Image (tube, rainbow, N blue to C red):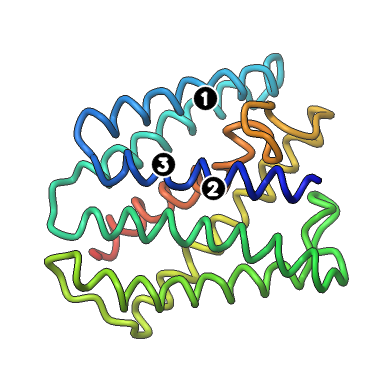
Amino acid sequence: MEFLKRFISSLVLIPTVFFFILKGSIFFNLFLFLIFCISCYEWYKMSSGKKYFLTGNIFLIFSFFTVFTIRNSGSSDSLFIFIFIIGVCIATDIGGYTFGKIFKGPKLTKISPKKTYSGVVGSYFFTILLTFFLAKDLNSFTNIDIFFDEYLIISAFLISTSSQLGDIFISYLKRRSNIKDTGTIIPGHGGILDRIDGMIFAFPFFYLLNLIIKF
Protein backbone atom coordinates (compact mmCIF):
# COMPACT_ATOMS: atom_id res chain seq x y z
CA MET A 1 0.00 0.00 0.00
CA GLU A 2 2.84 2.38 0.88
CA PHE A 3 4.59 1.64 -2.43
CA LEU A 4 1.34 2.32 -4.34
CA LYS A 5 0.98 5.70 -2.64
CA ARG A 6 4.57 6.60 -3.51
CA PHE A 7 4.09 5.49 -7.10
CA ILE A 8 0.86 7.44 -7.66
CA SER A 9 2.30 10.53 -5.96
CA SER A 10 5.39 10.33 -8.17
CA LEU A 11 3.24 10.08 -11.31
CA VAL A 12 1.65 13.39 -10.36
CA LEU A 13 4.64 15.07 -8.75
CA ILE A 14 7.39 14.50 -11.33
CA PRO A 15 5.48 15.85 -14.40
CA THR A 16 4.31 18.85 -12.35
CA VAL A 17 7.83 19.72 -11.23
CA PHE A 18 9.26 19.34 -14.72
CA PHE A 19 6.47 21.52 -16.15
CA PHE A 20 7.66 24.45 -14.02
CA ILE A 21 11.32 23.68 -14.65
CA LEU A 22 10.84 23.74 -18.42
CA LYS A 23 8.56 26.79 -18.28
CA GLY A 24 11.18 28.76 -16.37
CA SER A 25 10.84 32.52 -15.79
CA ILE A 26 8.23 33.68 -13.30
CA PHE A 27 6.39 30.35 -13.37
CA PHE A 28 9.40 28.50 -12.05
CA ASN A 29 10.34 31.27 -9.61
CA LEU A 30 6.89 31.35 -8.01
CA PHE A 31 6.84 27.55 -7.78
CA LEU A 32 10.30 27.59 -6.20
CA PHE A 33 9.21 30.24 -3.69
CA LEU A 34 6.20 28.10 -2.71
CA ILE A 35 8.43 25.06 -2.15
CA PHE A 36 10.84 27.24 -0.14
CA CYS A 37 8.03 28.50 2.14
CA ILE A 38 6.72 24.98 2.79
CA SER A 39 10.25 23.72 3.45
CA CYS A 40 10.89 26.51 5.95
CA TYR A 41 7.63 25.72 7.73
CA GLU A 42 8.49 22.02 7.93
CA TRP A 43 11.97 22.87 9.18
CA TYR A 44 10.44 25.14 11.84
CA LYS A 45 8.13 22.36 13.05
CA MET A 46 11.00 19.86 13.10
CA SER A 47 13.75 21.90 14.69
CA SER A 48 12.22 24.84 16.56
CA GLY A 49 14.07 25.23 19.85
CA LYS A 50 17.03 23.13 18.68
CA LYS A 51 20.57 24.55 18.60
CA TYR A 52 20.81 24.00 14.87
CA PHE A 53 17.52 25.76 14.03
CA LEU A 54 19.11 29.02 12.85
CA THR A 55 21.93 27.23 11.01
CA GLY A 56 19.36 25.15 9.18
CA ASN A 57 17.41 28.25 8.14
CA ILE A 58 20.56 29.86 6.75
CA PHE A 59 21.40 26.66 4.89
CA LEU A 60 17.89 26.45 3.39
CA ILE A 61 18.15 30.05 2.16
CA PHE A 62 21.53 29.34 0.58
CA SER A 63 20.34 26.04 -0.90
CA PHE A 64 17.30 27.60 -2.58
CA PHE A 65 19.46 30.51 -3.73
CA THR A 66 21.68 28.05 -5.59
CA VAL A 67 18.62 26.37 -7.14
CA PHE A 68 17.36 29.77 -8.31
CA THR A 69 20.78 30.82 -9.60
CA ILE A 70 21.52 27.64 -11.54
CA ARG A 71 18.13 27.64 -13.29
CA ASN A 72 18.20 31.38 -14.05
CA SER A 73 21.86 31.75 -14.99
CA GLY A 74 20.95 32.44 -18.62
CA SER A 75 23.78 30.29 -19.98
CA SER A 76 23.15 27.95 -22.91
CA ASP A 77 23.62 24.87 -20.73
CA SER A 78 21.70 26.05 -17.64
CA LEU A 79 18.59 23.99 -18.39
CA PHE A 80 20.60 20.82 -19.03
CA ILE A 81 22.61 21.29 -15.82
CA PHE A 82 19.45 21.85 -13.82
CA ILE A 83 17.67 18.81 -15.27
CA PHE A 84 20.86 16.80 -14.82
CA ILE A 85 21.07 17.58 -11.09
CA ILE A 86 17.35 16.97 -10.53
CA GLY A 87 17.47 13.78 -12.58
CA VAL A 88 20.46 12.39 -10.70
CA CYS A 89 18.76 13.09 -7.35
CA ILE A 90 15.56 11.36 -8.49
CA ALA A 91 17.49 8.39 -9.92
CA THR A 92 19.49 8.18 -6.69
CA ASP A 93 16.32 8.06 -4.62
CA ILE A 94 14.49 5.56 -6.85
CA GLY A 95 17.55 3.33 -7.21
CA GLY A 96 18.21 3.30 -3.49
CA TYR A 97 14.58 2.54 -2.64
CA THR A 98 14.23 -0.18 -5.31
CA PHE A 99 17.47 -2.04 -4.61
CA GLY A 100 16.98 -1.66 -0.87
CA LYS A 101 13.53 -3.24 -1.04
CA ILE A 102 14.57 -6.05 -3.39
CA PHE A 103 18.01 -7.03 -2.11
CA LYS A 104 17.87 -5.68 1.48
CA GLY A 105 21.16 -6.75 3.12
CA PRO A 106 23.39 -5.03 5.71
CA LYS A 107 22.40 -1.60 7.01
CA LEU A 108 24.56 1.30 5.91
CA THR A 109 24.37 3.33 9.12
CA LYS A 110 22.45 3.52 12.39
CA ILE A 111 21.68 7.17 11.61
CA SER A 112 19.23 6.08 8.91
CA PRO A 113 18.13 2.47 9.57
CA LYS A 114 16.37 2.06 6.19
CA LYS A 115 19.55 2.76 4.22
CA THR A 116 21.42 -0.34 3.04
CA TYR A 117 24.58 -1.04 1.07
CA SER A 118 22.44 -2.53 -1.68
CA GLY A 119 20.52 0.74 -1.78
CA VAL A 120 23.75 2.66 -2.32
CA VAL A 121 24.64 0.36 -5.23
CA GLY A 122 21.14 0.88 -6.64
CA SER A 123 21.48 4.65 -6.34
CA TYR A 124 24.70 4.67 -8.36
CA PHE A 125 23.37 2.14 -10.87
CA PHE A 126 20.24 4.16 -11.61
CA THR A 127 22.33 7.34 -11.72
CA ILE A 128 24.57 5.92 -14.46
CA LEU A 129 21.55 4.72 -16.45
CA LEU A 130 19.91 8.13 -16.15
CA THR A 131 23.13 9.90 -17.16
CA PHE A 132 23.46 7.70 -20.23
CA PHE A 133 19.91 8.41 -21.42
CA LEU A 134 20.17 12.14 -20.70
CA ALA A 135 23.37 12.38 -22.71
CA LYS A 136 21.78 10.39 -25.51
CA ASP A 137 18.35 12.02 -25.68
CA LEU A 138 18.89 15.63 -24.55
CA ASN A 139 21.37 16.36 -27.33
CA SER A 140 18.45 16.93 -29.67
CA PHE A 141 16.81 19.41 -27.27
CA THR A 142 19.81 21.54 -26.32
CA ASN A 143 22.27 23.82 -28.08
CA ILE A 144 25.25 22.12 -26.47
CA ASP A 145 27.06 18.87 -27.15
CA ILE A 146 26.58 16.33 -24.35
CA PHE A 147 28.85 13.32 -24.19
CA PHE A 148 28.57 10.24 -22.01
CA ASP A 149 32.20 10.39 -20.94
CA GLU A 150 34.19 10.11 -17.71
CA TYR A 151 33.64 13.81 -17.03
CA LEU A 152 29.85 13.44 -17.01
CA ILE A 153 30.00 10.13 -15.11
CA ILE A 154 32.21 11.57 -12.34
CA SER A 155 29.90 14.58 -12.07
CA ALA A 156 26.91 12.25 -11.73
CA PHE A 157 28.67 10.19 -9.03
CA LEU A 158 29.55 13.30 -7.03
CA ILE A 159 26.03 14.71 -7.25
CA SER A 160 24.53 11.33 -6.31
CA THR A 161 26.89 11.06 -3.34
CA SER A 162 25.99 14.52 -2.06
CA SER A 163 22.30 13.66 -2.48
CA GLN A 164 22.69 10.44 -0.49
CA LEU A 165 24.61 12.22 2.28
CA GLY A 166 21.88 14.87 2.43
CA ASP A 167 19.24 12.17 2.72
CA ILE A 168 21.13 10.51 5.57
CA PHE A 169 21.73 13.81 7.37
CA ILE A 170 18.06 14.85 7.24
CA SER A 171 17.13 11.36 8.47
CA TYR A 172 19.50 11.89 11.40
CA LEU A 173 17.86 15.21 12.27
CA LYS A 174 14.41 13.63 12.04
CA ARG A 175 15.49 10.94 14.48
CA ARG A 176 16.75 13.62 16.86
CA SER A 177 13.35 15.30 16.61
CA ASN A 178 11.56 11.95 17.11
CA ILE A 179 9.54 12.23 13.91
CA LYS A 180 9.16 9.87 10.95
CA ASP A 181 8.39 12.48 8.29
CA THR A 182 8.78 16.24 8.07
CA GLY A 183 5.16 16.56 6.92
CA THR A 184 2.20 14.85 5.27
CA ILE A 185 1.66 16.95 2.15
CA ILE A 186 2.79 14.22 -0.29
CA PRO A 187 1.04 10.83 0.19
CA GLY A 188 3.57 8.02 0.56
CA HIS A 189 6.49 10.43 0.73
CA GLY A 190 5.75 12.64 3.73
CA GLY A 191 6.65 16.31 3.55
CA ILE A 192 8.46 18.47 1.04
CA LEU A 193 11.74 18.16 2.96
CA ASP A 194 11.37 14.37 2.87
CA ARG A 195 11.16 14.60 -0.91
CA ILE A 196 13.95 17.13 -1.54
CA ASP A 197 16.37 16.24 1.27
CA GLY A 198 19.00 15.09 -1.22
CA MET A 199 18.41 17.98 -3.63
CA ILE A 200 18.94 20.70 -1.03
CA PHE A 201 22.46 19.33 -0.59
CA ALA A 202 23.16 18.44 -4.22
CA PHE A 203 22.48 21.92 -5.59
CA PRO A 204 24.76 23.82 -3.16
CA PHE A 205 27.42 21.15 -3.69
CA PHE A 206 27.34 21.62 -7.46
CA TYR A 207 27.17 25.40 -7.13
CA LEU A 208 30.28 25.54 -4.94
CA LEU A 209 32.09 22.95 -7.06
CA ASN A 210 31.31 25.00 -10.15
CA LEU A 211 32.98 28.03 -8.56
CA ILE A 212 36.17 25.99 -8.36
CA ILE A 213 35.89 23.89 -11.50
CA LYS A 214 33.92 25.62 -14.23
CA PHE A 215 31.41 23.22 -15.78
Residue at horizontal 44%, vertical 59%? 87
Asked if the residues shown at circle 3 and circle 2 are in contact, with their CB atoms under 8 angstroms apart, the answer is no
Judge left or right: residue 57 versus residue 23.
right
Going by the numbered disc 1, the residue's amino acid type is Asn
Q: Which residue is mark 3?
A: 17
Few, some or many C-alpha atoms within 10 Å of disc 2 (few <14, some 14-19, many ≥20)?
few
Residue 8 pos. (x, y %): 62, 45
Going by the numbered disc 2, the residue's amino acid type is Leu
Judge left or right: residue 8 versus residue 114.
left
Task: Indicate the secondary structure of the residue bearing disc 3.
Answer: helix
Which residue is more in the foreground, 105 or 46? 105
Q: Which residue is mark 2?
A: 11
Furthest toward the top, the residue is: 49
Q: Is residue 58 above or below residue 165?
A: above
Q: Is residue 118 above or below residue 210?
A: below
Residue at horizontal 33%, vertical 42%? 19
Which residue is more in the foreground, 70 or 187? 187
Q: Which label lies toward us, 3 or 2?
A: 2
The Cα atoms of the two marked residues, 3 and 2, are separated by 11 Å
Residue at horizontal 26%, vertical 41%? 69
- Pointer 3 or 2: first along the chain: 2
Task: Indicate the secondary structure of the residue bearing disc 1.
Answer: helix
Q: Which residue is mark 1?
A: 57
